[in-house]
Structure formats: structure tokens, C-alpha cells
Image: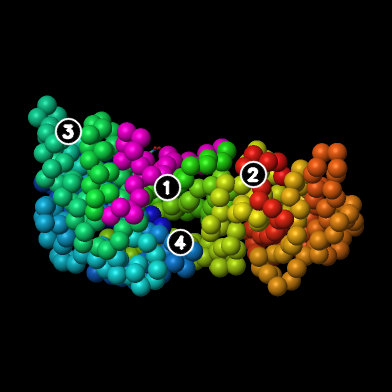
Amino acid sequence: MFIHWGLYAVPAGMWKGEAVHGFGEWLMFRKRIPLAEYGKLAGQFNPADFNADEWVKIARDAGMKYIVITAKHHDGFAMFKSECSDYNIYDATPFKRDPMKELAEACGKYGLKLCFYYSQAQDWAHPGGLNNTWDYDPAEKDFEKYYNEKCAPQIRELLTNYGPIGILWCDTPGVMEKKYAKAIVELVRSLQPDCLINTRVGHEYGDYTSMSDNAIPRFAYKKPWETPATLNDTWGFKTGDRKWKTASELIRLLVDINGKGGNYLLNVGPDAKGVIPAESAGILRQVGEWMKINGDSIYGTVASPEDPYMNNWGNITYKPGKLYLHVYKWPDEARMIYLMHMRAEVTKAYFLAQPDKEIPVFEGMRPSTDGGEPVVTQRYVPGNTTYWTMVRLPEKPITDPDTVICLELDREMEFGELI
Ligand code: JFZ
């Protein structure tokens, strides 16, 4: 779960009675709001309904395993207690709590990994940070000073005061010089060698690839990667944005991403009271219902060997020795799925929703298309050493919107093999 939460939750996309275009968290920049004025939002920021346990349970119940939260976004306001700048939620707001501490505890309690988003280059509240050209003269910019007195010390705080951190999630390196990206990597390594860093730290550093926002590669990508994605059209809360993706859409996107070897980092934008919008929570709960039954087809999967296909019935996810067929477009009344190029033999088949009830697997020709129970047939074709494999589906989906069939294989498949 990605969480964008900061002072921008107070205006929630509105400024002086006007709805502002773009992401909620970019409001200060869009309207070139002077820091002196934007900073006053801190006085009104009292998210008294914030409950770390609830947030973490929403993530856990959706099947999520890690949380990445904006410890500091581009606006420069720290959402944690910081000794290097009192422009932070503990010192500058009536809230007087450190939500990152509370989240660290809750993540420990429920077994999720906590990760911090930190805007390392853009900082609109420090004269040396990038991109605030309305308060500060670009000609006098001293990035080194910003790095030394805010960026590095705050990263140090985040990796010292909150226990083990899964990822330092950096963003928008912009024109930041290479030496700073290198210094951040070294700093993180020195403090928490197991903490991952995403590629948005810049200059091709980083342990895994953050794709562009909401972007899914067309083909499998074998290096570790992740798609950061919105649930509606903004990251930070905006009252006006109700363009929610449905649970069905999210499950398809998840399966598509997993089948190509990636992780899905899906965002929620809590409001100024500290509450994850009920719509977001409701949609995630529905995804969680599906995950509870079908999670085996998601966790621990790697890029599927079948990459070149666009099946007319759905997607495939894969882990060594197991193919998961995700059927979300029910084929015609013959209810048949054809896998004509399998070079592995199916040893066992079952629906994830009915793990104890095996689907019979026969050596032989195509099963009758005149109805009948689910069945898998396979026929070895000596000429091209493939098994023609066919699956007859039940009449109706079992777990709408995506029914998952697990095919256990007699061997591992290689990436690039056809299915
Ligand atoms: C950045 C931020 O500016 C934004 O506020 C949000 O935090 C998002 C997750 O990341 O915006 C980006 C960064 C990269 C791309 C697009 C928007 N990109 O690579 O397409």
C-alpha cells in the first residue's frame, strides 16, 4: 500500500474556493503558494481520527505486504518528529504525535514491512531544495546546504528511529547531481544494509525499478520491478476526485503486473482527519476477499514464461512448477481453454477456490465441448515435443471477477517458452 499523506490533505485540491487541477500533493507548486502562507496549513492540521492499526489492517486485509508512506513529499513538510527542521507534524501542528512511530508499531504488530517515501531532491520549503522558484531565487540555490542540513539528516532519522525499514522510496531526482544519489545510497547502506532503494533515487542507482506512475510494461521484465499506481486520479487526497477503479479492474491489473514479474504498489490518500476514504477502504476490502482465496497465484510469483501471449480469456501467473490460469473473460459455451505449446506435463490441477477437489487430468484428445465437469486433457505430440493441453471450465466463474486454476507441472518452465 502506497500512502500519500501530508499538509495537502487540508486543502484537498481546493485553493481559495477554486478547484485546482492535478495531483492533490502538488497544490503548493501549482498555485505558487508562498511558503509562509502554505505553512499555515500546519496550524489547521489535526488528524485526530488517525489510527495506525486501522490503516495497517486495511492494507493487511487487502493482501498487501508492505506500506510505503510519504515521510516527506515535495512540499518539504515532514510527517515525522524531526530534529533538523521543526517544519514537521510533531512540532508544527496541534496533533503533536508522530504517525510514523505509530505506523512502525502497527506494522510490527500485523507483520507488514514499513517503507518511507522521501522526496530527496524537490523540497519547496528549503531554499536549497529543487523547484520552489517563487520564494527563492534559483541563482542563489545551494543544494549542498539543503542536502547536508535537511535531506541527509532526515533520511538518517527515518532509518534510525523507526526500526527496520523495507524501502527508502525516493522520487523525482530532477537535476540533482550524481554525487547526491550516490551519497544517499551509501547512507542507507551504512544505516540499514537490508533496506532497498528504488531507481527514482536517480542516476541509475537503486535495487529495483519503479516504473512510471500507473505504467505496466507491455512484456515481462525480469529485473525486480514495481508499478506505483493510483486508486483514483490523484495521490494526495482531493475531495473532488471520485474516479475510483473498481475491485475487478484492480485484480486484473494486479494479475497483469504479477504475470510480468512485478509488484503492485497501490495508493490511498487519507484525508485531513487521518481517515482513509471509505470508498478506497471498501474497494480494497473487496480485493482482499479475492486475495484470501487466490493469494497463492500472486505471492512469490515470477515473470510468466508465456509472455508473448494476449489470451482472450485472461492472464497467467507463474511460480516455479506451477502455472496459474486467471480466467476473467469466460470463453464461449464450449468453456474451453487451449494451451497448445506446453513443454511441461500437468501433474495435478485444481481451482484455488476448491484446493481439495482435484480437476481430473487425462492423457488424451480434446474433451467433449458438449458440456460436462471441469477436466484437463493433454496429448503429447512427439513431432514438436509439446503437450496439447486443454481445460474445460465449469459453467460459471467460481470467484468473480477472476477464477484461478492451478496447473502443477512436472518441471520448471523457462522464460520465453510458449504455453
Ligand atoms: C511523482 C510525484 O511528483 C507525485 O506527486 C507522486 O508522489 C508520484 C508517486 O511520483 O510523480 C511522478 C513521478 C514519475 C512519473 C510520473 C509522476 N513518471 O515516471 O511517469
Q: Which residue is mark 2?
A: 414
Packing grade of label 1 (10 A; few <14, some 14-19, many >=20) is some
Above or below, comparing residue 136 to residue 265 in the picture: above
Packing grade of label 4 (10 A; few <14, some 14-19, many >=20) is many
Q: Which residue is mark 1?
A: 228
Q: Secondary structure at mark 1?
A: strand
Above or below, comparing residue 346 to residue 76 in the picture: below
Which residue occupies the foreground of this view, 371 or 374? Answer: 374
Whichever of callouts 3 and 2 sits on the residue coming sooner in the sequence is: 3
In the rendered image, residue 99 lying in the magenta stretch gets the answer no
Q: CA distance from mark 4 to mark 2?
A: 28 Å
Q: Amino acid at mark 1?
A: Pro
Q: CA distance from mark 1 to mark 4?
A: 13 Å
Q: Residue at x 11, y 52 (%)?
A: 84
Asked if labels 2 and 3 touch by Cβ distance under 8 angstroms, the answer is: no
Q: CA distance from mark 3 to mark 2?
A: 52 Å
Asked if labels 1 and 2 touch by Cβ distance under 8 angstroms, the answer is: no
Question: Residue 114: percent from the left, percent from the top?
Answer: 34, 60
Asked if labels 4 and 3 touch by Cβ distance under 8 angstroms, the answer is: no
Whichever of callouts 1 and 4 sits on the residue coming sooner in the sequence is: 4
Q: Which residue is mark 4?
A: 64
Packing grade of label 2 (10 A; few <14, some 14-19, many >=20) is few
